[in-house]
Amino acid sequence: MTIRTDVVIVGAGPCGLFQVFELGLLGLSAHVVDAMQAPGGQCAELYPDKPIYDIPAIPVCSAQELVDRLLTQIKPFDPVFHLDAQVTAVCQRDGRFLIATSQGEQFDAGAVVIAGGVGAFQPMPLRVAGIEDFVDRQVFYRIRNPARHHGKRLLVLGGGDSAFDWTVELAAQARGLTLVHRSDRFRAAPATVARMRELEAQGRVKFLVGNCVDFEADGDTLRSVDIRHTDRTVTRLEIDHALVFFGLSPKLGPISAWGLALDKNQIHTDTERFETNIPGIYAIGDIATYPGKKKLILSGFHEAALAAFAIKARLNPDEKVHLQYTTTSPIMHERLGV
């Protein structure tokens, strides 16, 4: 059976979830397809407890809390999720899109929004022979339970937001914490870098420039790692847990064969409608690229709003959209009973 809907959203991360909301405000229905087994994307899968600070009016929340809030927000619009599935084929017919998934589902949609983050993703591993034997016991690529690392001698590897966020978050609870990055130039937010430097000055964090090149174990217990510096000297660190944040290895999967204009693993869009080179297919969030692009959840929310208005105009070209403020939305008033 073919499911007919206004929009199919590919990706159930924060931007994909917010896209449901923006479409719902305009009276458009959406089905959401995601390769993960639960909504939330990277936020839920890789760092559910990571603190997020840049959501308007929410001083701080965890990544999982943000996902939960978004799911609550979109509930009035009855989205349908198709999880553990990938979109395997997209073709156009009479101005609409026929879409097939790896689970055998078929859709007839008026538009497609790709909100797939960086695509199908896996954490980039620590490339030290034999270290894989300790993964999820003493070597971690994601933090599911921060308390598990309290009171431990921690090694944090990486120079991006995740590495610095967890360094700042865990410094007070760790028995000791050493942050290691290949250089003293970082990709993390400047404010978080400044906070790490404050903790370093207080003696609560140690920072080293170098790479982890070897380890020593006692049976099935990891005891220490070797950090090689740029001058080829080596420092041996005794550790309990290693937290590795080298980023993600993105793979677009079937999307790469759709004929979209790509820049590496990102999709070119305009900045008025966030439409791709294929009319009716839109891209938002980390997977979208355009001049001045910033990979922020906040930016993805803005992209979702403009994409929704563009899709409304595409599907209902003769219908004037009067919505300017959510306080005037009759759909919200009706569905929330206010």
Image (tube, helix red, strand yellow):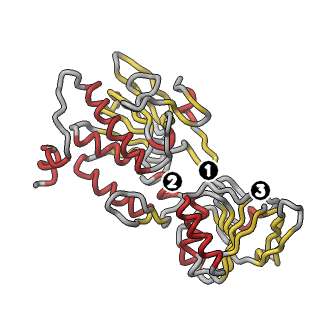
Disc number at residue 42? 2
Residue 283 locus on image (x, y percent): 44, 35
Q: Using residue 164 as the reference point, say whether residue 97 is left or right of it.
A: left
The CA distance from mark 2 to mark 3 is 22 Å
Mark 1 belongs to which amino acid? Leu
Within-10-Å neighbours for mark 3: few <14, some 14–19, many 20+: few
Q: To which residue does mark 1 refer?
A: 248
Q: To which residue does mark 3 refer?
A: 127
In the rendered image, the vertical position of residue 211 relative to residue 167, given as above or below: above
Considering every residue shown, the one lying at the far top of the view is 94
Quadrant of res 323: top left
Q: Is mark 3 on a helix, strand or loop?
A: loop
Q: Tell me what residue is drawn at x 80 percent, y 71 percent.
A: 225
Q: Tell me what residue is drawn at x 34 percent, y 57 percent.
A: 56
Of residue 144 and residue 338, the one placed in the foreground of this image is 338
Within-10-Å neighbours for mark 2: few <14, some 14–19, many 20+: many
Residue 34 locus on image (x, y percent): 45, 44
Q: Using residue 193 as the reference point, say whether residue 139 is left or right of it.
A: right
Tag count:
3
Q: Using residue 337 as the reference point, say whether residue 25 is left or right of it.
A: right
Residue 270 locus on image (x, y percent): 43, 29
The CA distance from mark 2 to mark 1 is 10 Å
Q: Which of marks 1 and 3 is nearer the N terminus?
A: 3
The CA distance from mark 1 to mark 3 is 14 Å
In the rendered image, the vertical position of residue 231 relative to residue 254, given as above or below: below
Q: Earlier in the sequence, mark 2 or mark 3?
A: 2
Quadrant of res 125: bottom right
Quadrant of res 304: top left
Residue 191 locus on image (x, y percent): 53, 63
Circle 2/circle 1 CB separation < 8 Å:
yes
Mark 3 belongs to which amino acid? Arg
Mark 2 belongs to which amino acid? Gln
